Amino acid sequence: MAPVLGEPMIGRQVERLRRARRIDPLVVATSTDASDDPLAAYCESLGLTVFRGSLDDVLGRFRAALALEPDAKAVVRLTADCPLTDPELIDQVIAHHHEAGADYTSNTLGTRTYPHGLDVEVIRPAVLIEAAERASDPYEREHVTPYIYRRPETYRLAGVSRRESLASLRWTVDLPDDLAFVRDVYARLYPSNPKFDSEAIAALAVNTAKAPA
């Protein structure tokens, strides 16, 4: 809910996610904890479907949210601390998932090549349900997908990577410096082009790094 150019950070992320052509509908899966009440109310004000479930059992929360869309062809997992998310990359990972006939597809399998904060995971619904029924490790319950990608002998995994690695870049928001970076990106890029892309962010990050102190 931290402000980024006058709007809560989650609102900026939703704005970008709505440009992904292959996501329909967009569901916010948050917890029933009272601390998430403002988040749920704000997301509902954006016209989003909000599902509220367990605070700690996030895999169970995703499984329950999936019941809202029983005909879904895939579940796309995107974490809410990534306001520089890339809608074109999301569409690319979803397309590759279907083309590969995969159970699980992401752009983080093996060696990371995308910036931290552009992570995309796509899961076949039946596999997510199976994971929710079988996973007992608390880590696998909290982080949703490890039960699947830890078992390549059981599930068909697919990955998307880029030729030139940008893995050293950090675009997620976990720390105050991360938020300061995101605010700077929006202040510099959004006014002239609200649909600024990852290449523009990367160019800005490189130029900022090279700027004299």
Image: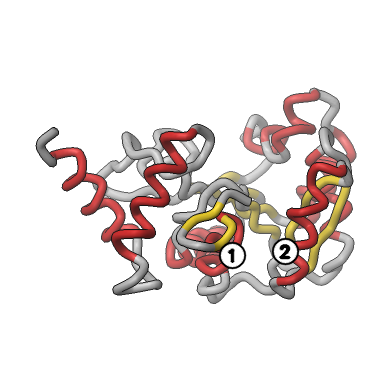
Label 2 crowd (10 A; few <14 / some 14-19 / many >=20): some
Q: Which mark is residue 166?
A: none
| Residue sitting farthest toward the left | 212
Between residue 73 and residue 185, name the one nearer to us. Answer: 185
- Looking at the image, which residue is at 37% across and 44% down? 181
Going by the picture, which residue comes out furthest to the front?
6
Secondary structure state at the residue bearing disc 2: helix
Which percent across, then down, holds residue 101?
A: 60, 59
User: Measured from the top left, where is residue 25 in percent x and y?
Assistant: 71, 72
Vertical relation: 193 (above or below) 5: below
- Position of 41 with respect to 206 (left or right) is right
Going 50% across and 67% down the picture, which residue do you hit? 16
Going from the N terminus, do you reach mark 2 or mark 1 first?
Answer: 1
Amino acid found under the numbered disc labelled 2: Cys
Q: Nearer the viewer, mark 2 or mark 1?
A: 2
* Residue in view at x 51 percent, y 47 percent: 119
Residue annotated with mark 2: 43
> In the image shown, does 19 or 141 lie closer to the viewer?
19
Q: Amino acid at mark 1?
A: Val
Residue at mark 1: 14
CA gap, disc 2 and disc 1: 9 Å
Q: In the shown orientation, is residue 140 left or right of residue 101?
A: right
Q: Secondary structure at mark 1?
A: helix
